[in-house]
Each structure stands twice: as C-alpha cells, then as structure tokens.
Image: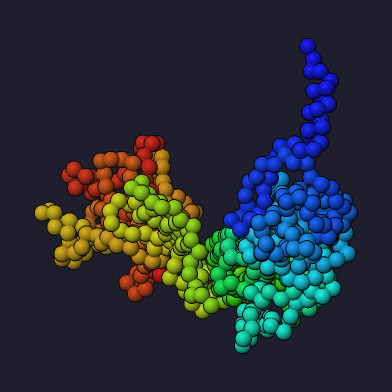
Amino acid sequence: MGIPAKFTTLATAIKNVMGEITTRLIKTEKGLETITTGEYPVRVASVEDLRARTPKIAGERVETSYHTYEGYGGGIYRHMPSDTTSEDNGGDTIVTAGGARYKREWANLDERDNVIMWGADPTGGKDTSAILQTMVDNDVMELHFPNGRFMVDAQVDLKQIGLSGNKFAYWGHDKNVAAVFAGPNLSHDDSRDDFSTGNFEEPENAETFGFHSSGFMFRDVHYARYLSFVGNGRKSTDACGLRAYGYVNHFEHCMFHGFYVAIGQLNCDSRVHRCAFTSLMYCAVSSGDSITTVTINQCEHQSCEKGYWFTGEVTGSGFIDNIWEECGAPFVSCRSSGSNRREGNWFEKRGGTDENGNPIPQFEVRMNQASQSEFSAGNSTRYNSADLNTVTKDDDEGHDGKLGGVSVDAGFVQVATSTGQRTNLHARSLDFVPDAWSEARAFKLTTRGNENGWSSLYLQPNGSLYVNPYYGGVYLSKVDRHTLSPAGLHWPRETVKDGEIGAWSAFEPAGYGAMRHKVPYRYTNPNATEDADGNVIDVETGEAAERYKEGSYTANMPIGVRWEGTFEKGKPTGKVAFFDESTSGNDSNGNPYVTLWSTHYQISDPFIIGVRCSNPDIEFERWSPSSSYSGSWGAYKICKGFYMFFRDKATKEPCLPTRDNADDTFEFIFMNGS
C-alpha cells in the first residue's frame, strides 16, 4: 500500500520551507564549530548582494549563487544576531552595510581552503594576493586553487602552510589547469644579493640571497602540489616563485616558468619530485651553511641557465632520474659535497664554460678537495659540445675525479678522492691517476691472507713492479742508462734448494747485456777432500780446508749440463768439446775423474752450483779446473773445463758414475763468477 498523495505533497511543502537537515561548519570566536540546520535558505546573487541585505528574521540563512565572479564561490551564510564584533574577511564572516554579521556555513575543510570561496579571481584579471593573505591569517589549512588563472602581484606569507591545485600543465597557461602567475609589480631586489665570492657573503644589514625574500610570490611555503607557477621574467629584478620554510618541504607535480628563482631556501629533508622547470635563471637556491637529505628526482628542465645552487655544503642528498635539456651549467653547484647520489640523469644540448673557456661540470663542487663518498651512475649525455662527461671534466677520459667517491658510467667505474686522485676501471683497462700534490704511493692489488697464503701486486711510483705470491715475489724495476737496478725477479727459495739460502734472479746489465742471477751455491772449493780420518783438507797441500760453502752469489746466468746413457772412454778424435772419463785415467793422486772440456768455451772463475747423479750409491766430491793455457787458472782464474771427482757414499772411495747403464744420468749446473 503506497503513501497517500496528500502526505507526499505535505512533505514536499515542509522541505521547501524548512530545507533538508544538514551538518555545517561555522567560524566563531571559539574556532570552527559544527552546527545542524534544516532551514531552507533565502537566495541572493552574490556576496555583494548579501552585504546590502537587511536580515528579515533573526538567524536567517542566505545562499549566494556566487561569491564575486559569476559561476564561482557560491555558498550558504547564517545570520548571527549575537555577533557584533567580527570583521568582514570575505570568507568566514560577511558584514552588511547595517552591521549585521553573516557566518559562512562550510560544507567541509576542503571548501574552506578553496580560494574562490573567498573571492579570488579565477580569470587572472585582478590581484588575489590580499585575499590569499586573509585566508592564511584566518588559519586555513592550505591554499587550494581550482582550475583557473590567479594573479599574485604582492608577496603572500603562508606561515608554514602549503599550496595545492587540481591539475598542472607543462606551460601553465591552459584555463583548464590551476595556474598562479606573478603580476607586473612583483620584483626581486637584487641589491642585496652578492654572487661575487660564490659564498653569498652578507652585505651589512641585508639578507643573503635565498634568505632574502623580496620578489617571491609566496614565502614560508611548506609544500606545493599540482600547480603551475608562472613568472614575469628571469632577470635578477624579476619575480621569484616560492620561498620554502624550515625543513621537510615538498614540491611535487608543479610547473615553474619564467622566474629569476623558482624555489628559494630549499632546505634539509626537502623533496622536489616530478616538477617541470622552464625558462628560469635558477631552479632552486639555498644559502644554508650545510644542507642534508635533499632529493631532486624525475624533474624536467628546459632552457634554464642554472639548476640547483647551494652556497654551502650538501650531503646525503640525491639527484636522480632528471632531464636537463638545452640548459646551461651547472645542474648542481655547492661549496662542498659528500655522500650524495647522482643517478640516471639525462643531459641533452647543454653547455656552459668558465671564464677560461673550460667546460663547467654538471655537478660542480666549488671548493677544491671538498668532495667525498659520492656515487654517480647511469648519467647520460647527448649533443653536448661543452664537456665530455656529465659528472666531471677531463681532457683525456672525461672524468677528473673531483667527485671524491664512486662514479659509474657506460664501461667505466671510478673510485676517487676529492683531490682528483683516482682509479679508473674501463672495459679493457685499469689505471691509477695521482693528484698533483700527494706523496707518491704504490698502487696495490692485494688479497688478505690467511694461514694458507696470500698474494699482492704493487705498482710502485718509481715505475717498478712488485709481486708477492706468499713466500716469494717478483720485482721488476726501472733501470736508467747509468745505474744498475738492485731489484729483480724473485722466486721462493724452496723451489731452488732446501735450506735457508735465498735465491733470486735479477735482470741486470752484465757484460754485453747478459742476464745476471743471484742463486744459492754449495761447491766452491775445487781442492777440498777428506783424509782417512774424515778431516777436510786441501788435496794439494794436505792442510785443513773448507769442504764447501753455502750462500748466494750474484753472477751471470747459470749453465746446466746433462749427460745420460752409456759412453766410451777416450777423447773423440777431431772433436773440439767432449764430456767423458779422464783420458789419462787418474789425477796426480791416482783418483779417477770425469772431464768437461771445450775449445771454444772459456770459463772465468766458475761456481759449481749443484751436481746430481741418478745412481744413489755415489756422490759428488770435488772438482778442479782444466786450464785454458799454462798458468791461466793460477793467474786469472780462467779455464776451459772441469775435472769432476766422485766417491762411493758408503766407503768414501773414489769412483765414477756407471757408464754401462743407459738409465744412468749425470748433470750439474755452473756459472761464470765474473
């Protein structure tokens, strides 16, 4: 069963008279208060009509179709008979010509923050700065700009609140986006700026650039998002955009065009994200002594003279995935820098040189030796004529190392100090570049050792090479035209002989450029033998003598001689060299020997380094020289060969290596002593 028509008609009549029951916000002396109302409002055209009205009944509600500009800002106002002191602020309170007060019933806080609800001109025809300042002074949460164009011709102090819009455009002139532009009277006072030193020293009784707020449309800005800001030029006397307040400022999805400075006093913990900067002198500046944790990422820049200028130190910050197209240089400039990230930035058709014509790096650290622990990677360039690399400049490789950290580029990794001392790893090379004033030190490639060993490679600053594979090493050093180098090629002594005798091979000039070696020796006394009691004596004088000496000696390269297999006794007829048993059978004492002799080989003061037989039952005893000519050995220590004596290990009786066994071998190593 439906509702009778007469009751429906009655309900409609009541609604038309009383209105729907709603909840509203009204600004009172106590602040914003919530009220419930159901009275249907009286309709008028604008706020000006409301100001001309005389209340018909106490507490009446009046609805305006618009605020000041037709189609924008209409709302409901309630007459407040008890209020006799509130001032007309164009938003919360409207005062009539007769002194009646009407309070705006706000649907919500977002409506109260909307600038057109307070009478701002959305067409750009009139200055809105006074209205905006009134909103801030009456404690709105933010200034929200709907789609439209809003002129600001005098600075607005936001007192640490933010700005927002519905949508921004790349150029900011579209009526379907939220755009705020500087009026003709807004200008920066450049007489208080001092760029001469690069440190922005403060003139007397004046603020430094960045702290100085003249010419900024808005100051003490906490954040801005989804807005387009348009200036009136980029000369030093033209308008500036937003001056940040304190720390933790965010600028996101905004466009800045045609300013001297887009963002002033960018400070610690601040973020500029997905913003567009076009036709600016400076994208952002800050005169703080130390700025930390600033992030500039995914921003687009076109036709900007300079990027982000910091008067002091910048640390712990990131400049990531930005586009710098057809702009000047530098992209970032600071006095000193540390622990910053520079990644994935794109630089196209940019330029800029200093007074000497040298290219200005995209990331500029103005103080020498003032950069460390940096990381750069994936920065790319295209059509850049002024520099070779986006990170730092260098005539040869495009990286001068002044970042003082790690740089990564295509086929290239650099680790550097802020002085320019650096190691470059290329796709096919590794090179170390010292700075101009540090002391010379070795370039090291090392592994940290344990009980199983280690290895090290040092490239010494004097041009030498040192390799240390655990117990030995290799030393290759530079030799000039007049000086013999003491260094050489070293190998572990265990591979030469057991014991504690060191051994090394030095590539040194000797004679006609022969190689000289330092090797261990053992058999140096050709006349040493033993008597029946086992005492070592000289075979000729019978006096006590040294059996052998152990040590190391530097001489020419050793020569190894090896014989194996059977042989026949006797000197071969017509031969100029032979290796055989003695033709006479025995020496003067009746001892047999083996002879090595050559007509064409002259040996000077030789050292027998080592002798070895495959027969385990015999051992080498001693050797004596075979003179080249009468008296050559006694006078000059020159011989043509050796007489070599062996003995039985068990009986100590003289003997010779077996000559009938094809498996027997006999070898020894000797070298010229001088």
Of 118 and 344, which appears nearest the observer? Answer: 118
* Vertical position of residue 263 compared to residue 164: above or below: below
The spot of residue 384 in percent (x, y) is 79, 64
Which residue is most to the top? Answer: 1
Residue shown at the point (70%, 64%) measured from the top left: 87
Can residue 257 be seen in the rendering of this structure? no
Splitting the image into 4 quarters, where does residue 602 fall?
bottom left
Splitting the image into 4 quarters, where does residue 304 fall?
bottom right
User: In the image, is 521 to the left or to the right of 598?
Assistant: left
Which residue is most to the bottom? Answer: 204
Q: Quadrant of the C terminus?
A: bottom left
* Vertical position of residue 51 compared to residue 485: above or below: above
* Vertical position of residue 215 compared to residue 36: above or below: below
Residue shown at the point (63%, 80%) measured from the top left: 207
The spot of residue 292 in percent (x, y) is 56, 63
User: In the image, is 5 to the left or to the right of 212?
Assistant: right
Residue shown at the point (39%, 36%) measured from the top left: 662
Which residue is most to the left? Answer: 533
The spot of residue 644 in percent (x, y) is 32, 54
Colour scheme employed for the rendering of this structure: rainbow
The spot of residue 44 in percent (x, y) is 85, 51
